[in-house]
Amino acid sequence: MDFKQIISHCKEYGFIYQSSDIYDGLSAVYDYGPYGVELKNNIKQYWWKSMVQMHGNIVGIDAAIFMHPKTWKASGHVDAFNDPLVDNKDSKKRYRADQLIEGYTDKIEAKIIKDVEKARKRFGDDFDEDQFKTTNGRIIDRQSKIDSILGEMNQHLKDENMVGLKELIERLEIACPDSGSKNWTDVRQFNLMFNTQLGNIAGEEGKLYLRPETAQGIFVNFLNVQKTTRQKIPFGIAQIGKAFRNEIVARQFIFRMREFEQMEMQFFVKPGTEMEWYRHWKETRMKWHESLGTSSNHLRFHDHDNLAHYANAALDIEYQFPFGFKELEGIHSRTDFDLGSHQKLSGKKLQYFDPEINESYVPYVVETSIGADRMFLSQISENLKEESVPDSSGKESTRTVLSLNPAIAPVKCAVLPLLKNKVELTKAAHDVHDKIKLHFNTQYDEKDAVGRRYRRQDAIGTPYCVTIDFETLDDHCVTIRDRDTLKQERVKIDDVVSKIRDKVDMNGLLTS
Ligand code: GAP
């Protein structure tokens, strides 16, 4: 489905609403609706269980959003958490210089993807994508143009060369996407942290920041956690929570928001072993994405050329969103930068005594960091489809289905009496609903013909519909319809819960 259809589906079916909609919305801030919150909670639960519950050496915390302002000085965010900003003088629209340039290379990449798809159709099963990409002259030229532009851009970002970025934009003749004008201001740095004021302290002293990442709450608690849980290195601390960034350009729906949620894990290791753990988490996290059924063709690694101030290695796991391959998750080897800086600025030792070598040291850190909202968008993009299926009379009709992995589906089961105005049916259906709702998020629905109710459940991704008909009253069986196979099966009421559990239980994912 294209991106516009995804956005309108999210609104129409109660997944996501624009924040403060009745006041015409607040830019790049969104609210999760009834199905959205369930799906997001399930994604967070799956991440938490995989990280914390499945690892004896990873524990969780929930740190406050507000932190001592020195935290952000030590972390480098006050001085270096900047994006290069450029304004178009005619349209007055503001852009991130690197995103304008990436938008230019995305268009070249879209041409490559189109050529690859054409060739795939032409060659059928024999098609070898890698071979095609490395031998087709037009693709090689396009790829080398992308590499050269991005290479130059990354060098300018690294050198903080704002003049170089402006020259690149002008040389590529990049126009304002809104007005088509090429009349740009100079590029300048813009700090992304939101700030506010502590109630009883005036001026700089009382300046507080809304955290731009959850990671720092973990670093400042490193010793508290290590001592109180008696963890030995290597061990990790995980956290899920809100983060805030005053993004210059926050388009693309929930992909880039000003208020969003992160799921981060900092893994503390012995210095010198960090690359081993970096590789470990790189593979582990990719498997996690694939475990939900996301096609491996839609996921890829992207090594950073332009390393952040704290990292000695970094990569993204990218997902092919409807607008191209973009960062979904970051894996960073953060060295001892954060603990070292906090130790220096606070004057408090943040060291670990390693009994195996009888020495104390500041541990190195490998971080995995993923946005819950981006993960949500990747799952909707991956699974929302229109497909042709036979209707009750056997004729082909189109349905919209959200084929989410059942373990994260917002509603696991819908209970549907065949008819709404037959008390004996609705009563039996309520009884079945009461039984199932103890175990899973279940919905009772009696409005409209049963076919339309199936379609509504398909559109929100419900793996099972349970229908109560007149036979149920005699044989105590119900019809269970499977969202994916459309197969209908008679099952005893007493067996319904175990039948559903077989398919929707998250533990199946965790142990596979
Ligand atoms: N602690 C490291 C860190 O924050 P990051 O690459 O800036 O690294 C990590 O962010 C993840 O957070 C990203 O991969 C993305 O999924 C998510 N993220 C970052 N900025 C975001 C935004 N403005 N809106 C939604 N998600 C965002």
Image (spheres, helix red, strand yellow):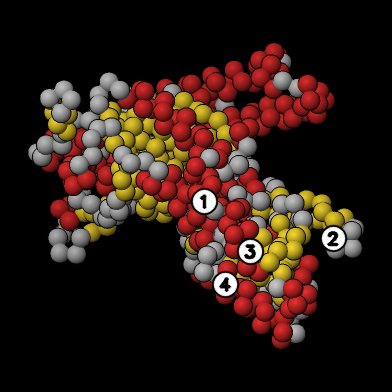
The residue at which mark 4 appears reads as 435
Q: CA distance from mark 1 to mark 4?
A: 20 Å
Disc 1, disc 3: CB below 8 Å? no
* Label 3 lies in ligand 1 vicinity (Cβ under 8 Å): no
Tell me the mark number nearer the camera, choosing from 2 and 3. 3
Disc 2, disc 3: CB below 8 Å? no
Label whose residue precedes the other's in the sequence (2 or 3): 2
Tell me the mark number nearer the camera, choosing from 1 and 3. 3
Label whose residue precedes the other's in the sequence (2 or 1): 2
Pick whichever, 195 or 44, lies toward us.
Answer: 44
In terms of secondary structure, where does tag 3 sit?
helix
Which residue is depicted at the point 76% across and 55% down? 486
Which residue is depicted at the point 31% across and 39% down? 57
Disc 2, disc 1: CB below 8 Å? no
Label whose residue precedes the other's in the sequence (2 or 4): 2
Is residue 181 in view?
no
Pick whichever, 187 or 10, lies toward us.
Answer: 10
Please give the label number shown on residue 391: 2
Name the amino acid type tagged 2.
Asp
Pick whichever, 2 or 283, lies toward us.
Answer: 283
Which quadrant holds residue 391? Answer: bottom right
Residue most extreme to the left: 347
Q: CA distance from mark 2 to mark 1?
A: 31 Å
Measured as percent of width and height from the top left, residue 266 is found at: 32, 38
Q: Is residue 86 above or below residue 391?
A: above
Please give the label number shown on residue 495: 3
Disc 3, disc 4: CB below 8 Å? no
Name the amino acid type tagged 3.
Asp
In terms of secondary structure, where does tag 4 sit?
helix
The residue at which mark 1 appears reads as 506
Which residue is depicted at the point 43% across and 44% down? 50
Measured as percent of width and height from the top left, residue 30 is found at: 49, 59
